[in-house]
Amino acid sequence: MAILKSRCSIGSDTGFADEMSEIDLIGDDLLSEIIVRLPFKSVARSTCVSKKWRAAVSDDYLRRRLPLLMTTVYFPDDDDDTARGGGGGGPRFACAAADDDDDDDGHRLEDCDLGFLQERGGVVVCDGCNGLLLCRSPGTPEFYVFDPVTRRWAALTAPAKEATLSVLAFDPSTSPDYRVVNFTGWRDRAATVEVFSSATWAWTAHDAELGGVPASSLSGSMHYHDGVLYILASEPDCLVRLDLADFSSTAVIDLPEPVDGGDGRVAHSGGRLHYICSDGELLKVWELDDQDQLASCQWRLKHAIEVEHLVQGGCRGDEVRFLALHPEKEDVVYTWSPWKVVEFDLRKKTSCQAWEFRKGERNRVIKTWLVPSSCYLSDCLTHCPVNC
């Protein structure tokens, strides 16, 4: 960041144009090496240095080299309204802060400004996906998509029907577009849905078949990746694969073992689908082989580690929960304990790093993602009606 401080001081107009000219003389290779070493907030600010820097930050090659940004939605445990997902202090959205040599506490989670929720008059968070939040005004058909990192938001057009469940579907690694999936009605083995697309800026109605799985067996555990919504179900224990481009091509994938009231999640890492489950004693990670041939695919057990190995700072085993898989490093998981988020290498059986919440504050994390960078998040709101 020193280069930005030395080159971009605007305390005096004298020589400022010369300094900007010197910045533009930096070669593309050297410029890329500088930018990829900046903290994520500094990367966003560096777009204001010059047109050349802005173009460099916007380049896909450079952005693929930027470090992943760990983001999380959580509630303080002392929030009396936590169970309803709002009220009291409401939800908080935090990003892993950059290392600070002057900070004796090491890694920390830094809250982003969610003043938008109060400014819109009691807006609540319905869902979140890969760094974006889906919000709604209670008692109205108004939906908003909000990016806490860039503080940009978009007000969606009103859907035709009221939703019983709303899901945000966003995968910045494949497209800057997002979808909102409203489940508006349930039948025995099917559902009616309305889908909003930021690409068309319109809602479309669909009948979604659930592959013979009773609607009553679907859980609230959902995962979106590359145009597909995965929904965990029990009785039967399976995974419903709902293609958002063609709702009639639903597939059902049997789970490797029953959920049985345990903590079950699905996630993608290294381009493969994983199933992660915990019974409070063992955390198991399964990988789906040959997922292009769903009829013959098989689950392979990759890891089975005792939960006590994941415990840190005096926490009990029942206070540890799986949050996310690293999207590229298949052996790295992220877990929650009341005071921190921990990155853990399952193969080496050791923690890599941890991020603490506010000092001495217990929290409950709802969702965690690792996204390519704040620059990718800003792209998803650049081609549609937005506000800052």
Image (cartoon, rainbow, N blue to C red):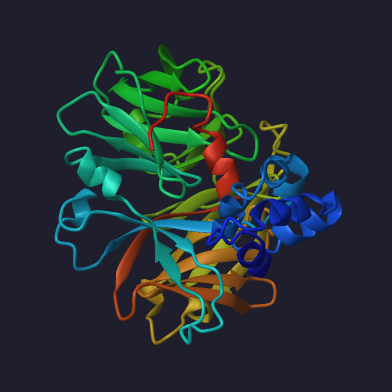
Q: Quadrant of residue 171?
A: top right
Residue 40 spot, x, y in % from top left:
58, 58
Q: Quadrant of residue 352?
A: bottom right
Residue 372 appears anywhere in the view: no
Farthest residue, direction front: 14
Q: Is residue 106 left or right of residue 196?
A: right
Q: Locate the C terminus by quadrant.
A: top left
Q: Quadrant of residue 68?
A: bottom right
Task: Please name whichever residue, 241 or 98, is drawn nearer the observer in this view of the structure.
Answer: 98
Q: Is residue 5 left or right of residue 215?
A: right
Above or below, comparing residue 2 to residue 24 in the picture: below
Residue 87 spot, x, y in % from top left:
16, 52
Task: Please name whichever residue, 178 or 101, is drawn nearer the observer in this view of the structure.
Answer: 101
Residue 338 spot, x, y in % from top left:
35, 73
Q: Locate the N terminus by quadrant.
A: bottom right
Q: Is residue 160 left or right of residue 256?
A: left
Residue 246 appears anywhere in the view: yes
Above or below, comparing residue 380 to residue 87 in the picture: above
Task: Please name whichever residue, 179 or 220, is drawn nearer the observer in this view of the structure.
Answer: 179
- Marker count (numbered): 0
Q: Report the residue at 26% width, 44% height from top.
A: 117
Task: Please name whichever residue, 48 or 116, is drawn nearer the observer in this view of the structure.
Answer: 48
Q: Is residue 70 left or right of residue 337?
A: right
Q: Report the residue at 64% width, 78% height from top.
A: 349
Q: Report the residue at 58% width, 62% height from top.
A: 9
Q: Report the residue at 56% width, 82% height from top.
A: 101
